[in-house]
Amino acid sequence: GESVGLHLPTLSVQEGDNSIINCAYSNSASDYFIWYKQESGKGPQFIIDIRSNMDKRQGQRVTVLLNKTVKHLSLQIAATQPGDSAVYFCAENRGDYKLSFGAGTTVTVRA
Amino acid sequence: EPEVTQTPSHQVTQMGQEVILRCVPISNHLYFYWYRQILGQKVEFLVSFYNNEISEKSEIFDDQFSVERPDGSNFTLKIRSTKLEDSAMYFCASSVGGSVYEQYFGPGTRLTVT
């Protein structure tokens, strides 16, 4: 079936470096994408979203890129901090009432 | 900042028992959702609710599950006869609008079925 997935289950990054987390999706009908951060024992926390009519969106220290040609979504975190250690999920909405989540990438920040 | 709240944080129940998980969505939100996450796995959609009725449900949301908005603030998920495989984190979420609006998640209820 069609689903949202992530390229790598884990990512280790040096504090202060930039992080890039990738996600591939297969449903070309998806029109809304969100990145969530989940810390241990907590619910998913919204980071940034992007609609399908855009290819880039920036927030505070984060940038989301959408490449509809290859159905690829990425999250870039600038100057990664210890507090960025978490599991990151991409999620898509296909114009209905639910989000479909990918499997998650665990980001570990090394001091 | 307004947030979604859930109670209890942890519920332990015996197989076959009924459980009710409670959520208070953000007050001006109109769409409500339940998701679950089995340990170590991705978040899975269960059901969405709008205007006092189910908008969409997944295959997981079978006849053992039901949702209700008993008053103007609470949103509940009931599992009538729990199974071992129902053990998971259950997240409530809410949003202002439907499909292209951010869903805000609560902290979750950890359900353990023994």
Image (cartoon, coloured by chain):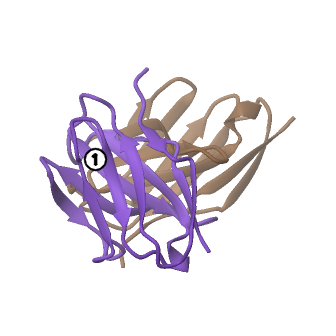
Task: Please provide percent x and percent y for residue A23.
Answer: 51, 57
Residue A88 or residue B68, whichever sits in front: B68
Q: Which residue is drawn at 62% across and 65% down?
A: B39
Above or below B109: residue B58: below
Return the residue found at the far top: B1
Q: In this view, does B105 lie to the left or right of B72?
A: right
Q: Which residue is drawn at 68% across and 53% down?
A: A106
Q: In this view, does B91 lie to the left or right of B24?
A: right
Please tell me whether mark 1 sits on a helix, a strand or a loop.
strand
Q: Which chain carries label 1?
A: B
Looking at the rendered structure, the kind of residue marked 1 is Phe
Corner quadrant of residue B23: top left
Task: Please provide percent x and percent y for residue A61.
Answer: 58, 26
Q: In this view, does B38 lie to the left or right of B29?
A: right
Q: Is residue A99 visible?
A: no
Q: Label 1: which residue?
A: B32
Above or below A11: residue A84: above
Residue B54 or residue B114, whichever sits in front: B114
Q: Residue at x 44, y 36 (%)?
A: A48
Corner quadrant of residue B4: top left
Q: Which residue is drawn at 72% across and 52% down?
A: A11
Colour seen for chain B: purple
* Disc 1 residue crowd, few under 14, some 14–19, many 20+, Cα 10 Å: many
Q: In this view, does B89 lie to the left or right of B60?
A: right
| Quarter of the figure with the N terminus of chain A | bottom left
Q: Can residue B112 be seen in this view?
A: yes
Task: Please provide percent x and percent y for residue B3.
Answer: 42, 30
Colour seen for chain A: brown
Task: Please provide percent x and percent y for residue A111.
Answer: 87, 34
